[in-house]
Image (cartoon, rainbow, N blue to C red):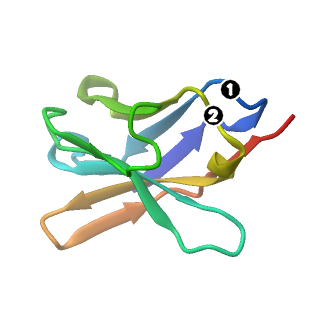
Amino acid sequence: VQLVESGGGLVQPGGSLRLSCAASGFTFSSYRMSWYRQAPGKERELVAAISSTGGSTNYAASVKGRLTISRVNDKNTVYLTMNSLKPDDTAVYYCNAYFNRKYEYWGQGTQVTVSS
């Protein structure tokens, strides 16, 4: 099982990034996919989640309207499109796969830094 995040980097406040998470080794289309983040000195928090079919999404209040989660099951990939980025969005972003209260996998994380 692998979850490989990419797309992180340094961006100025107000800028945009798109994170990708490529999955392999499990039935991607059966799993709920999520993005979490962890800032220095803080606990890991849920940013956004998407159902297995993509028909349902939910977001943390702090990112609603600025970040969008999406998935392409044919490509085994989940995305996080981030607009109007703020310094408070600086964190390591992790991809998560979850199924049926039994199976859960994590990626290695990608750093996002929002700074002028």
Residue drawn at x 32%, y 55% is 97
Picture residue at 82% right of the left edge, 39% below the top: 115
How many residues crowd mark 2 within 10 Å: few (<14), some (14–19), many (20+)?
many
Of 104 and 14, the residue lying toward us: 14
Lateral position of residue 38 relative to residue 27, left or right: right
> Can you say whether 105 is above or below 25 in the image?
below
- Counting labels gives 2
Return the x and y of residue 107 as percentages of the image width and height.
51, 56
Q: Quadrant of residue 13 in the image? A: top right
Quarter holding the C terminus? top right
Residue neighbourhood size for the residue with mark 1, other residues' Cα within 10 Å, grouped as few (<14), some (14–19), many (≥20): some
The picture places residue 114, in percent across and down from the top left corner, at 75, 40
Q: Report the side of 97 relative to 54 (left or right).
A: right
Q: Residue furthest right?
A: 116
Q: Position of residue 83 (x, y in %)?
A: 55, 26
Residue 53, how many percent across, how many down? 14, 35
> What whole-number distance in Å separates the C-alpha atoms at marks 1 and 2?
5 Å
Q: Which label was assigned to residue 14?
A: 1
Residue type, numbered disc 1: Gly
- Sooner in the amino-acid sequence: mark 1 or mark 2: 1
Pick whichever, 21 or 83, lies toward us. 83
Is 7 rendered above or below residue 37? above
Q: Quadrant of the N terminus?
A: bottom left
Residue indicated by mark 2:
85
